[in-house]
Amino acid sequence: MSDIAVKDMQVPQVSGTAKAPDALDQRLAALDLPKGAFAAARADALARLRAMGLPGPRDEYWRYTDPRPFNAPEPAAIARIEGPDSPLFASRDKLTLVFVDGVFDAAASDDLALDGIEITTLANPLGAEWADGLFGTLEAAGQSPVRRPFAALNTAAARDGLLIRVTGKPAKPVHVLHRRASDKADAIWHHLIRVEKGAELTLLETGSVGARSNGVIEVDLAPGAKLHHITAKRANDAKVGLSHLFARVAAEAVLKSFALAVNGTTMRQESVIDMVGDDAVAHVAAAVLGDGDEGPFHHDDTVFVTHGALRGESRQVFKKVLKNGATGVFQGKILVKPGAQKTDGYQISQALLLDEASQFLAKPELEIYADDVKCSHGSTTGAIDEDALFYLRSRGVPHDRAIVFLVLSFLADALEEVEDEGLRDEINERLDAWLTGRGRA
Amino acid sequence: MLKINNLHVKLEEEDKQILKGLSLEVPAGQVHAIMGPNGSGKSTLSYVLSGRDGYEVTEGEATLDGASLLDMEPEERAAAGLFLAFQYPVEIPGVGNMTFLRTAVNAQRKARGEAELSSGEFLKAVRAKAAELQISPDMLKRPVNVGFSGGEKKRNEILQMAMLEPRMCIMDETDSGLDVDAMRLVSDGVNALRDAGRSFLVITHYQRLLNHIQPDVVHIMANGRIVKSGGPELALEVEENGYGDLLAEAG
Ligand SMILES: Nc1ncnc2c1ncn2[C@@H]1O[C@H](COP(=O)(O)OP(=O)(O)OP(=O)(O)O)[C@@H](O)[C@H]1O
Ligand SMILES: [Mg+2]
């Protein structure tokens, strides 16, 4: 590792007159910037961050979500949820890798050896030469045309994460299980996943992250590669969380990403997908349930899909169920570059408001510079369908149970994006249990 | 079984009176048919009896075995034994037909203090009844009514009725949209359910259904009231001459 990077990360002193340190300086001063591998990439990221600054109240890209919880030097401490954690996908054979407050815990994790996959960590990247020159580059590329300062901050400051190179078709999914040790944890992790030509991986993420979390996943899919990514963090977990998925999808490669979020405090998930090869496929979806009675709830999905090659297929399916003053946000864009003919881009964002106190703010955008494409987007905000509710109740289904049916019905399109039927069923059952109050974890 | 006395119903949102003093009684074990011109209030009657929102009862009452229906929630009416086969069955994407039906059956059993059916028992029963109605296993697996043809939706209503074993069955134009063979299947299904403890109120525009499901009484409804009641011959009269004479006669 080089010393230069570390020096670069020092907060620069303003010579001469004393000046109040600006928000970014304070934010950086509170971080324990790592001294380790990828020093050059981290230094670049820090420079990017300095050039961008933190988002302010007038930042267009942060119009619907207050950036202050992410700007603050320290996260607000949160109460821990009672009761045992019962992460999803328990019945599935998988390779579980435990992260505690964003740091890999080797002792608690399964052995890293698995056919068809090489796993190392950011803090200890022994043998991950393949990651040199890749780490941080997808994040960097994703900074244009929209600035994403917290992703740059992540690249500069992430203490740990996984470096995964998939060369075959591993027999089981890789499962990242997050655990929280401290109620004040400011967890910052950064995964880099490279799926080689024709290789495939299913990546699962569950558990409780820090009081504040900042997770970045960079995904580099070679031609014909496939990644299925499913995130289902612990429900009812008061937290401030930000995540970025940066994916580069080569020819005939397939990315499927699905996230489930149930309650929380302030969350923003950004997906930045670059379709660089012909016949690439990328689906991003989320199912979100927010109940303001469990604490203030704000959930933001921000998606940017760029088609830069022929016959790309992209799908964005985002569904939010909101009640008791919960707020849902969706900012989704499809950009079709000149020459990206035969692009098939689809985007739907929908909210089901269970009362009038809740709100959904949506900003769908299409920007198309090719003439032979099929792109559609739609956004709806609705209430429970009274006809359907009456139909169910007239069959003897009690009111509350009927509402659960209709909520699941509303979310079904998003869950369809979970390709593996077993995983999908498990998510459905868990949702059902949450909704009927049979389970909280 | 079902007693409706001087029922007056208006729309909640508008000042529009739809049922205007309707009286009707269906004794246990009988099949009654209701015929009447479009817009006379037949579907409204079926909705008010099963508890749909949007209507206001301004006068009169309706009881099922002496218990006042109008004070109950829709699911309570169902558990009490009332069933409505909808004129327009509702599509519910994302909810499996089987899951829905099993939940409904067990919720009713629970409300009545009966033991719930195990999934094995339920599956066996539903498969047998579906086969009788020629509902394919594939349709059972699909979301409720989604992608069903008009006739398939109606058969699905009868499947639900057969599984729920209600005592008072209201069928709102179940025959419309059915082909000749489906009409026979549905009628056979209904006839199989007929017994001394179960009653039917069959709303229809066509005498043909009543050839298959022989009614004990036929009522003619017009402008929110029953204007004439009689035997099965009344249906033949409507089929031949329309409503003109009957309505004129009723004033
Ligand atoms: N929600 C409503 N809003 C406005 N008008 C309504 C509403 N519900 C019923 N009506 C009116 O009440 C009258 C009775 O309607 P209803 O559907 O009960 O008739 P029907 O006898 O079932 O007719 P059909 O034979 O065509 O099925 C009609 O004039 C209808 O337009
Ligand atoms: Mg009608």
Image: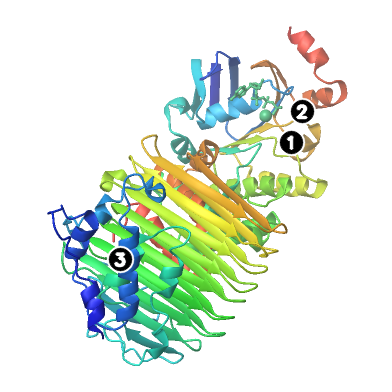
Amino acid found under the numbered disc labelled 1: Gln
- Name the mark nearer the viewer: 3 or 2: 3
Could you tell me residue A80's position as x and y percent? Answer: 18, 59
Q: Which residue is drawn at 65% across and 72% down?
A: A279
Kindly identify which residue carries mark 3.
A153
For residue A34, which quarter of the picture? bottom left
- The subunit letter for the residue under badge 2 reads B
B207 lies above or below B190: above
Which label belongs to residue B232?
2
User: Considering depth in this image, is A248 or B154 the residue closer to the camera?
Assistant: A248
Kindly identify which residue carries mark 1.
B214
Q: Are the numbered discs 2 and 1 placed on the same chain, yes or no?
A: yes
Q: Which residue is drawn at 20% across and 65% down?
A: A12
Amino acid found under the numbered disc labelled 2: Pro
Badge 2 crowding class, 10 Å Cα cut-off, few under 14, some 14 to 19, many 20 or more, is some
Q: In which quarter of the image is ligand 2?
A: top right
Q: Do the residues labelled 2 and 1 touch (CB within 8 Å)?
A: yes
Dot 2 or dot 1: first in sequence order is 1
For residue B141, which quarter of the picture? bottom right
Asked if one can make out residue B61 in the rendered structure from this viewpoint, the answer is: no
Asked if one can make out residue A141 in the rendered structure from this viewpoint, the answer is: yes
Circle 1 — which element? Answer: loop
Specify the quadrant that holds the C terminus of chain B: top right
Could you tell me residue B236's position as x and y percent? Answer: 83, 27
- Name the mark nearer the viewer: 1 or 3: 3
Circle 3 — which element? Answer: helix
Q: Which residue is drawn at 12% across and 54% down?
A: A18
